[in-house]
Image: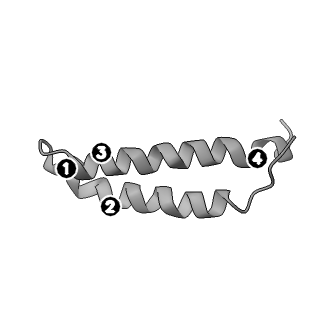
Amino acid sequence: MNIRRFFRRAPWERTTTALIGIGLAMLMQPWSLDAFSYSFVVLLAGVVGYSVAGKLPVGD
């Protein structure tokens, strides 16, 4: 596997956007205190990942 192909912007942006959405869903749900407790960590990881993914090359 080529390293340049692995570090393309589009798949990482999609993944981190999904992570942000999951974090928001975890934050707004009223059923599970465990999910609510980890929601900020998941949301923060998604935002940091999206910031890093924005610096990656666009790719082929």
Q: Which residue is mark 1?
A: 34
Check if mark 2's residue and mark 4's residue have beta carbons within 8 Å: no
- Between marks 3 and 1 in the image, the one whose residue lies nearer the viewer: 3
Residue marked by disc 3:
25
**Contact, mark 4 vs mark 3 (Cβ under 8 Å):** no
Which residue, given by chain and number where applicable, does mark 4 sit on?
8
Q: Nearer the viewer, residue 6 or 54?
A: 54
Kind of residue indicated by mark 1: Asp
Residue kind at label 4, given as amino acid type: Arg
Q: Residue 59: horizontal and vertical position, in percent?
A: 83, 45
Quarter of the image where one finds residue 56: bottom right
Instruction: Tell me which label, 1 or 2, sits earlier in the chain.
Output: 1
> Pointer 3 and pointer 1: residues touching (CB < 8 Å)?
no
Mark linked to residue 40:
2
Q: Quadrant of the C terminus?
A: top right
**Sequence-earlier tag: 4 or 3:** 4
